[in-house]
């Protein structure tokens, strides 16, 4: 049931638990779990005591939603490619068209040609992945060469793949993976992730030494990371 206490709307779930708990979900909904016998007054008191915490979390999630709105893959929606915004045009393919199920970039537009209504998102993700595989080597090769010339180390292998929640990773065997979604971000952000992972070839941790090496290679890494996080709220 939905209640509205002191301008805060929340859902209340009563069960045979012993204490009152509050959860703020990423969609901004507040859920209060309380013992069966808890009174409205007791619940209100707990909410009042934790109001600062609740508001802080609601604002944090609101900011995340603002920066990363849910994508619908419909006409007119804006999508990023190398940090630049493009307008999506979703076209229905004719049955025998050669362009059936394809994506292409044309001026300020990204055109999706789809044979099936449900395919726009999948086609877009496939396109991002194939573009990342095509373009990342051009971006990261000079970065790797520069790093090798100074520190005399290089990765064994570089792969580009879809990753759920990380920008990139570096294995103990020196294999570096880059998230294909980085193709949405500016070149300087992709370079930052590459340097971050290269630094792990020397320091396999996030120690003080790691960060001083990172700053040596890429003095403005903090700004780049901040920009990257505003587009893809991950880490690495
Ligand atoms: Zn790292």
Image (cartoon, helix red, strand yellow):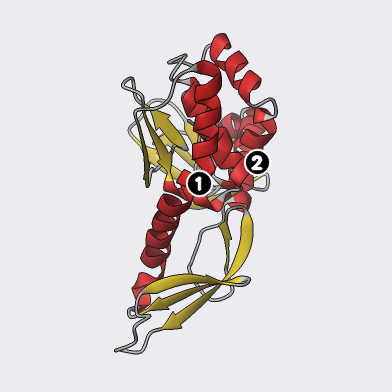
For residue 148, which numbered disc appears in the image?
none
Residue 219 vs residue 48, the one in the foreground: 219
What is the spatial separation of the Cα atoms under label 1 and label 2, in whole angstroms?
21 Å
Which dot, 1 or 2, sits closer to the camera?
1
What residue lies at 62% left-to-right and 53% top-to-bottom?
A: 83
Residue 58 seen: no
Residue 104 drawn at (x, y percent): 48, 71
Q: Quadrant of residue 44 in the image?
A: top right
Q: Would residue 169 appear left or right of 228 to someone viewing this image?
A: left
What residue do we see at 62% from left, 39% from top? Answer: 60
Which residue does the numbered mark 1 point to in the structure image?
138
Which residue lies under the disc numbered 2?
227
Count neighbours of disc 1 (C-alpha within 10 A) and say few if under 14, some if 14 to 19, many if 20 or more. few
- Name the spot of residue 139 as percent of width and height, x first: 53, 44
**30 lies left or right of 97:** right
Disc 2 secondary structure class? helix
- Snapshot quadrant of residue 233: top right
Q: Earlier in the sequence, mark 1 or mark 2?
A: 1
Asked whether the beta carbons under mark 1 and mark 2 sit within 8 Å of each other, the answer is no
């Amino acid at each position: 049931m939905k209640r509205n206490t002191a301008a805060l709307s929340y859902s209340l779930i009563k069960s045979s638990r012993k204490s009152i708990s509050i959860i703020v979900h990423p969609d901004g909904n507040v859920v209060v779990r309380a013992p069966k016998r808890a009174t409205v007054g007791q619940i209100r008191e707990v909410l009042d005591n934790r109001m600062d915490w609740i508001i802080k979390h609601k604002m944090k999630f609101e900011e995340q939603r603002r920066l990363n709105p849910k994508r619908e893959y419909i006409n007119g929606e804006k999508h990023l490619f190398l940090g630049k915004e493009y307008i999506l045009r979703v076209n229905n393919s004719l049955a025998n068209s050669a362009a059936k199920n394809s994506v292409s970039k044309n001026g300020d537009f990204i055109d999706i040609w789809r044979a099936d209504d449900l395919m726009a998102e999948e086609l877009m993700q496939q396109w991002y992945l194939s573009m990342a595989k095509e373009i990342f080597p051009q971006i990261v090769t000079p970065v790797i060469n520069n790093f090798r010339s100074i520190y005399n180390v290089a990765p064994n292998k570089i792969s580009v793949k879809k990753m759920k929640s990380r920008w990139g990773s570096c294995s103990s065997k020196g294999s570096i993976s880059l998230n294909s979604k980085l193709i949405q971000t500016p070149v300087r952000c992709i370079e930052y992730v590459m340097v971050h992972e290269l630094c792990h070839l020397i320091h396999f941790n996030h120690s003080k030494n790691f960060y001083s090496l990172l700053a040596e290679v890429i003095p403005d890494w903090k700004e780049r990371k901040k920009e990257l996080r505003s587009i893809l709220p991950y880490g690495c």
